[in-house]
Image: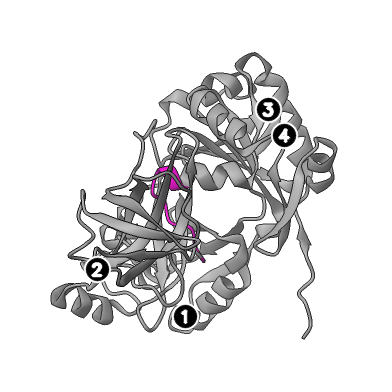
């Protein structure tokens, strides 16, 4: 069996010189931590941290039928997007599963950018190509290798980097963006989005300027205790918000309605597998992705079994961790709908010990946006 060659983000060597521990993630060698995951996590919650997420994929979709194409391949209603606005969505597959979840940016009247997960870049591209036949006036470009992406996250993000741009960062509404000059580099897309619930911005930077922009961010943020953060903290931050991680909580075989993505599933228009999902909605779902927190002391991990009062297995942990903010174990699991009710007490099997948990509705902590 041939192993796939590891891909590299532009600043890989820089992260190594900064002391980052590098791991494989999504086919890329990525920084997982620089100091400790807890320290990086809390710094993002309290101050400002920077993630290099240049492994993410970016596709440009343009042409007279660009909107029609996006409406067909994604479940959310992209007709609601004005220029300068972004939305969260997902790509349903032909069987009602999830090809990927993604962000959609409206750049111009007939141009959009799709931001997809790193591990799914090739899969998403190939899937979208199969849907292009019915939209001859659409052009797609994969610009993933031309774009570096930095997520500057935390309550002090705006003030930490404001001096690097004339764009008034605090005036950009949540899930909106502007394109302007940043750290002397033109055509940087500055987006008020993130995966942490801590507020902040995501910066799409031409790859040739990646190192200069990265260094400028840290120079500007010195007075605000700006620190780099790795994938470990990114995972615990997103889990505290109850955000899905593709490959853990959602995949090609999970129902978006069971995953709690009904809010971005708009049956007011046609899209791939809409009839399957509409039927599922009308008949009612049997299970639901929900949150839980530990009552007994312990740390839930992916794959651990969840049992009811009778000892029957009713679910498995899809994501789990010790919350650095709460100092308690938290997680996500698909549970039968009758058990996915806030306050329900269940048990988790942690290496043979049956530990008590309580079902809670995410987010586990208050959003800072």
Q: Nearer the viewer, mark 4 or mark 1?
A: 4
> Is disc 4 placed on a helix, strand or loop?
helix
Please give the residue where the numbered disc 2 appears in the rendered image.
310
Q: Which residues are magenta?
A: 239-247
In this view, the residue farthest toward the top is: 223
Q: Position of residue 330 (x, y in %)?
A: 41, 47
Looking at the image, residue 88 lies above or below residue 365:
below
Examine the image and state in which quarter residue 166 appears: top right
Examine the image and state in which quarter residue 60 appears: bottom right
Please give the residue where the numbered disc 1 appears in the rendered image.
131
Please give the residue where the numbered disc 3 appears in the rendered image.
217
Q: In percent of the image, x 46 and y 35: which residue is there?
A: 327
Please give the residue where the numbered disc 4 appears in the rendered image.
214
Q: Marks 3 and 4: in contact by CB < 8 Å?
A: yes
| In the foreground, 168 or 28 | 28
Q: In which quadrant is the N terminus drawn?
A: bottom right
The type of colouring in the image is: one colour
Task: Reply yes or no: does residue 243 show up in magenta.
Answer: yes
| In the foreground, 23 or 129 | 23
Q: Nearer the viewer, mark 4 or mark 2?
A: 2
- Which badge, 2 or 1, is on the more N-terminal residue? 1
Q: Marks 1 and 4: in contact by CB < 8 Å?
A: no
Determine whether, in the image, residue 205 is placed left or right of residue 133: right
**Mark 4 vs mark 2, CA separation in Å:** 54 Å
**Mark 2 vs mark 3, CA separation in Å:** 54 Å
Q: In percent of the image, x 55 and y 35: which residue is there?
A: 41
Residue 22 can be seen in this image: yes
**Mark 3 vs mark 1, CA separation in Å:** 40 Å
Examine the image and state in which quarter residue 134 appears: bottom left
Q: Position of residue 257 (x, y in %)?
A: 28, 67
């Amino acid at each position: 069996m041939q192993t796939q060659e590891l891909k590299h983000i532009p600043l890989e060597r820089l992260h190594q010189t900064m002391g980052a521990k590098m791991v494989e993630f999504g086919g890329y060698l990525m920084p997982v931590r620089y100091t400790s995951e807890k320290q990086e996590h809390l710094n993002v919650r309290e101050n400002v941290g920077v993630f290099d997420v240049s492994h993410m994929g970016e596709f440009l979709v343009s042409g007279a039928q660009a909107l029609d194409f996006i409406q067909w391949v994604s479940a959310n209603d992209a007709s609601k997007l004005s220029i300068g606005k972004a939305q969260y969505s997902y790509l349903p597959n032909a069987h009602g599963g999830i090809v990927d979840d993604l962000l959609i940016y409206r750049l111009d009247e007939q141009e959009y950018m799709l931001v997809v997960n790193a591990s799914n870049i090739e899969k998403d591209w190939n899937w979208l190509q199969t849907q292009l036949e019915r939209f001859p006036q659409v052009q797609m470009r994969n610009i993933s290798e031309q774009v570096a992406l930095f997520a500057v996250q935390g309550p002090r993000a705006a003030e930490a980097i404001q001096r690097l741009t004339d764009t008034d960062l605090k005036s950009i509404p949540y899930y909106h963006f502007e394109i302007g000059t940043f750290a002397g580099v033109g055509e940087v897309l500055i987006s008020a989005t993130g995966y942490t619930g801590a507020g902040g911005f995501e910066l799409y930077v031409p790859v040739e300027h990646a190192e200069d922009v990265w260094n400028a961010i840290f120079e500007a943020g010195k007075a605000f205790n700006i620190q780099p953060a790795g994938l470990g903290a990114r995972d615990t931050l997103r889990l505290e918000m109850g955000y899905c991680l593709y490959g853990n909580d959602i995949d090609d075989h999970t129902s978006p309605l069971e995953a709690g993505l009904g809010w971005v599933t708009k049956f007011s228009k046609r899209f791939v597998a809409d009839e399957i999902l509409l039927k599922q909605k009308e008949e009612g779902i049997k299970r639901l992705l929900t949150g839980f927190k530990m009552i007994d002391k312990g740390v839930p991990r992916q794959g651990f079994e969840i049992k009811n009062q009778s000892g029957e297995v009713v679910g498995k942990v899809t994501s789990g961790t010790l919350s650095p903010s709460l100092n308690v174990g938290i997680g996500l699991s698909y549970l039968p709908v009758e058990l996915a009710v806030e306050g329900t007490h269940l048990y988790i099997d942690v290496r043979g010990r049956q530990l008590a948990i309580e079902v809670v509705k995410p987010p586990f902590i208050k959003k800072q946006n």
